[in-house]
Image (cartoon, helix red, strand yellow):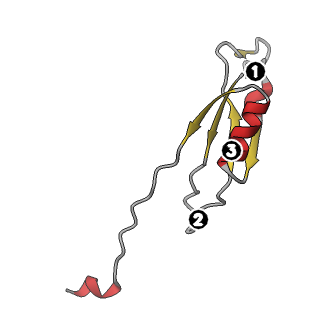
Amino acid sequence: MQVRIYKPTKSTMQSGDGNGLWLLEFVESSGSKFKESLMGRTSSKDMANEVKIKFPTLEEAVRFAEKKNYNFEVIKPKERLLIKKSYASNFK
């Protein structure tokens, strides 16, 4: 089973660094979604893609994936470039 391990980005409503947790989620397999004939809704045969497991560190998430024999992909977060600004520089 294929899983993805990543650190989600913070929401736009957060001013901090986010919660710092790593997520392990299952990758959706092809052909798992279909359209119901009665109501026309999109359904899925595989509900594993609804599962997201939170881990405090990357190492714990990788250890869990290896223990369960999952094929995993680690997506490293991009480092933010913080530009320090001074209020006084607005008036130069």
What amino acid type should be assigned to the residue bearing mark 2? Gln
**Which image quadrant is residue 20 in?**
bottom right
Kind of residue at badge 3? Leu
Please tell me which of labels 3 and 2 falls first in the chain: 2
Residue 67: x percent and y percent? 78, 32
* Mark sitting earlier along the chain (1/3): 3
Q: Up-down: is 10 above or below 92?
A: above
Q: Could you say whether the residue bearing mark 1 is in a helix, strand or loop?
A: strand
| Mark 1 or mark 3, whichever is nearer to me | 3
Compare residues 28 and 34 and report the one nearer the observer.
Answer: 28
Q: Name the outermost residue toward the left.
A: 92
Query: What residue is disc 3 on?
Result: 23
Numbered tag placed on residue 44 in the rendering: 1
Q: Nearer the viewer, mark 3 or mark 2?
A: 3
Q: Is residue 47 left or right of residue 26?
A: right
Write the residue at 67% across / 12% down: 31
Q: Nearer the viewer, mark 1 or mark 2?
A: 2
Neighbourhood count class around disc 1 (C-alpha, 10 Å): few under 14, some 14–19, many 20 upward: some
Mark 2 element type: loop
Residues packed near mark 3 inside 10 Å, few (<14), some (14 to 19) or many (20 plus):
many
**Rendered-image quadrant of the C terminus:** bottom left
Element on which disc 3 rests = strand
Residue ID at (58%, 57%): 11
Tell me which amino acid carries mark 1. Answer: Ser
Q: CA distance from mark 3 to mark 2?
A: 18 Å
Q: Where residue 87 sits in the image (x, y, percent)?
A: 34, 85
What residue sits 80% from the left and 14% below the top? 38
User: Which sits in the foreground, 2 or 60?
Assistant: 60
Task: Name the residue beneath numbered marker 2.
Answer: 14
In the rendered structure, are the residues bearing label 3 and label 2 in contact, judged by CB atoms less than 8 Å apart? no
